[in-house]
Image (cartoon, rainbow, N blue to C red):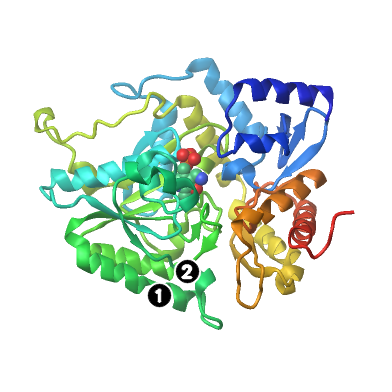
Amino acid sequence: MSSDNTQLVDRDLAVLWHPCSQMKDYESLPMIPIRRGQGPWLEDFDGKRYLDAISSWWVNLFGHANPVINRAIRDQLESLEHVILAGFTHEPVVRLSEELVALSPPGLTRCFYADNGSSAVEVAIKMSFHFWRNQGHSRKTRFVTLGNSYHGETLGALAVGDVELYKEIYRPLLMDTLMVPSPDCFHREQGESWEAYSRRQFAHMEQCLQQHGDEICAVIVEPLVQCAGNMRMYHPIYLSLLREACNRHGVHLIADEIAVGFGRTGTLFACEQAGITPDFMCLSKGLTGGYLPLSVVLTTDPIYAAFYDDYDTLKAFLHSHSYTGNPLGCTAALATLEIFRSRDVLGRNAELARHMAASVADLQDHPHVGEIRQHGMILAIEMVRDRAGREPFPWQQRRGLEVYRHGLDQGVLLRPLGNVVYFMPPYVIEETEIDLMARVAAEGIDLATGLKTAV
Ligand code: PMP
C-alpha cells in the first residue's frame, strides 16, 4: 500500500469505529481509503480502481460524481442548506413530495420525511400503531414480520427484522413480534415454480392474520427481495395475496422499499409488479441517487386524516428528526428523478439485467452453486457445500470473505452476504464492466469453494 493509503488507514484506526465490522478483522484485511469516485468506479490513494458492484451499500443509482446531481446540489447550496421542517417549508421538499406522490402506487398521497432507512421504518411502525389508537383500537399493538427479513438497526426496526446475526444479542431489548415463515423461493421443492411456492407459503400468513388480526397493527415486508437476508427472492403473487388479506383482516401493509425501490427489481417500485398499494411505503437509499441521507414514508389520505384534529385531542404525530426533509437531500432526490425522466432508465436496465444473467450462465452447473436468482438489477449466486442437497457451507468458514478478498485484489468491490455473492450495480455500468464483475465473481467462487487454488 502506498504511504498515502497507509497513513490514512493508521489515522483512521486510531480514532474510528466502523459500521458492521469486527474491528479486529482490519488487522488482516486492511480497509481501503477512497480518494474519488467516477461512474461505477472508486479509486484509492494509489490510483487503484474498484468497480462498485454493490452500489456502495445499495444506494448509488447513477454513478459516483454524477454531473447532473452534482450541479443540482451545488446550485441549492447557494440558497439554502437546511431549515427546520416544523413550522417551515421549502421548495425542494414540496416539489419532491409532489413528484413522489405522482410516481408512487395510486392512493399514496402524503409524504413524511426522516433521514435514514431505519428511521423511516420506525415512522411507519409508530404511525400504524398510532392510527389504530386514534381510531379507538387500543388492542392493536403487534406487528407481523417475515422470517429472514431485514428492516434496519434501530431497536424498532431490528425487532421487526429476522437476521439472527444482527438481532440475537439485543433480543431482550426488543418488542415482541409475530414471525411468519418467509416465501423465500430458495426453499421450494424441486420442480415447484416460484409462484406455486410463494402461494403455498402464504398459508402461514393467512393463518396468523386469522388468529391475531384484532391485535395486529401491520404486516411489514420487503417486496420481492429480502436483501440483507442473503438476497432471497419471491414471487409478486405473495404481495397480491397479502394486500387482499390485510384488507380482509383490517391490518395495515408496510412495504419497505428502502433497498428495492427506484428500479432495482425492474419496475420503479417493486409493489408495482403485484399491482398493489401498501398503506405505508418506506423509501431511502436510492432516493437521493446515493448522495445524501434522506428517507420518506408515503401514506394514504385516510391514515393522514386520522391524525388531523384539534391540538388538545393529542392525536398528532409528534415524531421528528433534526434533518427531516433536508433541502440538499431533497435536491439530490429531485435530480435523481430528473435522470429517470430524461432517459429510459428502466428500458436500459432490462438490457443490463439480461446481460448480467448471461454473464454468469456458465456458473449454473458449478458444483458449488446451489442457485442463481435474479429480480431485475439484483442478481445473486448462492454458494453451497453440496449442490444436490443445497447444504450450506458452515458460516464460520467465511467463504464469502474469500470472494471479497479476490474481488478487491482484482479491482471489483463485491461484498458477499454469507455464502451469497451478488451484484447490485449502479445503472451506469456498461456491458464490459458487467463481464469483468462476472469473471471476477466466478474466479472468487472457484477459489472460495476450493475448486481452484490461488497461484
Ligand atoms: N430496510 C431495508 C430493506 C434495508 O435494506 C435497509 C438497509 N440495508 C434498511 C431498511 C435500513 O436503512 P438504513 O441503513 O439507512 O438505516
Secondary structure found at label 2: loop
Q: Amino acid at mark 2?
A: His
Q: Is residue 208 above or below residue 260?
A: below
Residue at the spot 84% in from the left edge and 59% down from the top edge? 453
- Which mark identifies residue 235? 2
Residue furthest to the top in view is: 78
Q: Is residue 339 above or below residue 352?
A: above
Q: Do labels 2 and 1 touch, CB within 8 Å?
A: yes
Q: Quadrant of the C terminus?
A: bottom right
- Which mark identifies residue 199? 1
Q: Would residue 174 appear left or right of 274 to someone viewing this image? A: left
The answer to whether residue 60 is seen in the rendering is no
Q: Would residue 37 appear left or right of 127 to someone viewing this image? A: right
Residue at the spot 75% in from the left edge and 63% down from the top edge? 359
Residue at the spot 60% in from the left edge and 55% down from the top edge? 418
Q: Is residue 3 above or below residue 292?
A: above
Residue furthest to the bottom in view is: 191
Secondary structure found at label 1: helix
Q: Is residue 6 above or below residue 151?
A: above
Q: Amino acid at mark 1?
A: Arg
Percent across and percent down for residue 52 are: 70, 44
Q: Is 79 in front, or is 362?
A: 362
